[in-house]
Amino acid sequence: MLENQKKDVGLYGFTGCNGDQLTIIHSEDKLLDFWQSVHIKSFSLAKSDNDDSDLDIALVEGSISNQEQAEHMKEIRKRSKKLIAIGNCACYGGVQAMELGSKGWDQRFRKVYGDAFFELRTPIESKPIDVFVDVDFYIPGCPINADQFFYCFAHLIQDHVPTIPDHPVCAECRWRENDCLLLKGILCLGPLTASGCNAVCPSHNLPCLGCWGPVEEANVSSEFNLLKEKGLTQEEIKRRFRMHNGSGIIKPLKKILGVL
Amino acid sequence: MRAVKLRKQDLPAFLKCVQSFGELWGPVREKDRQVLKKTDDVNQIDLTTIRTSLPFKKLLFPPRFSMFHFSGNKYTTSLEHLPNRIIFGLHPCDIHALLIMDDFFTRSFDDPYYTERRKKTAIIGFSCIPDEKCFCHATKTDTVEEGFDLFLTDLDDFFLIWVGSSLGDDMTRECPKIIDEGILPEDLKKYVEWRKYRNSQFKMDIDLTSMPEIFDLSYDSVIWEEEGEKCLSCGACTIVCPTCPCYHVYDKIEMGKIEGERMRQWDSCLFKEYSMVAEGHNFRESRAERLKLRFTHKLQAFVGEYGKPACVGCGRCIETCPVDIDIATIVRRLRGEEVKV
Ligand code: SF4
Ligand code: SF4
Ligand code: SF4
Ligand code: SF4
């Protein structure tokens, strides 16, 4: 690709484990192409000469959990043509947003931190980035899947919109011919969860915890009823549904339960 | 049709012998299910298999594969290096499904990604006794006259082998020591009795007569909405169905290059994007509409076009759907029969 056609790209991390940026860094076989196909203007986990110039594409990992982060997020948005959320925390809020949508954040916060004084940061309830800014594209996962990420990235830097199929985890799970855990009465979130992980958990006989976040057509109420029929309690189901689905599960769950 | 005999104890030797024609694939038990697998150890093949979790279609067009590699204006396919394969153990329902697939992928134009694999695939069918989910008697797919190279019927102390093609003929002649050409009158009698016994073993009570008309009259039925509320849109029923051929095509490009792979992967009419066209318009926005499409296609539209349903009664969707939406429940509900919900 010609030097002057290359996009200016920045990577940023807010509240999260850095797993998504690390997934990129650990993809040794892709790194040369990654670095050569764009100008990486900022990637503080991987290099030290970072700047705050205007960007064609900003990739953002992590949720927003203090006011300073919210300001920084808005500032990145202002100088970026495209904003891409990567990973579950940026897309849905991550595990730190599992209570999103319920009242009582103040009490929960005090229970953990007591009356601690935060000098440099003003904590707020942790939320996905699209609560603060417009997001152009979401690449979910916990962490993101390298294949899915580089597939999307290759398209985005050529101004194509990548297509992530709207399949749930079950599709990839059935392709791999796993024994279906849900049929055995195990709380598997495969039908509600976006695919892309290659059904890694059910392929190891572990139920899907939903870490890719909800698939567009997730039929939350049907799976909820099914799990109740199979003998699971409302509390167990609710906990599992909320664990990774953050902002993505609030509406459908409120519809079933009334309040969260 | 030529027929020969094979003693029970000679089956492993026979399968070993036909391996000179290609890789042997057969049903192998894995935990709670049977999976069609490549196996060199013929003793691994589970002859009691009723249905493999995925049908043969995974070998003729895999769930996800690269059609070709492109670079600039050039492209190269990888169809030259396909292996020869023998699929052992297909029951009549799956052989009927194979004939439907063959027709689908060749009728309007030849799809090389299917036909090149198909040409290199030999089929050795195997008889079965239906379980409580089989209903090939209702779809009239319980016996086969074509679609196989060899077909083995298990008659207790020996197998009666029907030879269905010249390749099948070659296979029997490859192993002359164990193949017995002399079919006796009592062997035929045994076969006829076996057929009678098998016919008596169907447990599922399902009536598929007049389905096209019933669908016509049920277009606005509440059944679709009710079942649509339950459907998880997981796609499992279409993935396991031996007559569902739908796929999605996309390009996987390399970063910063005009180079990549054109990929094909299984799609499902129960996924919302399947019916989406340009500008985001969707012909089947709701789950109810998508379910209606699946069942109407299997039992009405296909009958209009091909003179038979596109369901071969294999029972896989019955075994698979987490919320019990399958051919049997839908047909019963449409006929106004009692269905436990
Ligand atoms: S095990 Fe889970 S992910 Fe796999 S098919 Fe069953 S419900 Fe879906
Ligand atoms: S199976 Fe579910 S929990 Fe496991 S990685 Fe995939 S989306 Fe996450
Ligand atoms: S619709 Fe169901 S029973 Fe009929 S062929 Fe497909 S999977 Fe088998
Ligand atoms: S298997 Fe059942 S729940 Fe899943 S898409 Fe098919 S009908 Fe719907």
Image (tube, coloured by chain):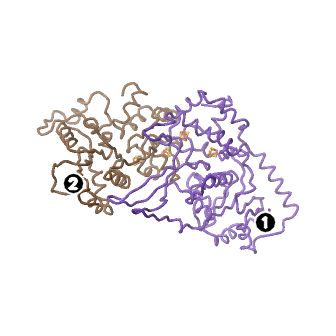
- Using the image, tell me which numbered label, if any, was put on residue B204: none
The x, y position of residue A250, in whole percent, is 36, 32
Q: Chain B is which colour? A: purple
Q: Chain A is which colour? A: brown
Residue at mark 1: B5
Residue at mark 2: A45
The x, y position of residue B223, in whole percent, is 59, 29
Queried on whether the Cβ of the residue with tag 2 lies below 8 angstroms from ligand 2, the answer reads no
Viewer-side residue, A203 vs A155:
A155
Quarter assignment of residue B207: top right
Q: Is residue A207 left or right of residue B256?
A: right
The x, y position of residue B189, in whole percent, is 86, 57
Furthest-left residue in this view: A119
Q: Give a yes or no on whether discs 1 and 2 share a subunit.
A: no
The amino acid sitting under disc 1 is Lys
Q: Is residue A242 above or below residue B178?
A: above
Mark 1 closeness class: few <14, some 14–19, many ≥20 residues within 10 Å? many
The amino acid sitting under disc 2 is Leu
Give the quadrant of the N terminus of chain B: bottom right
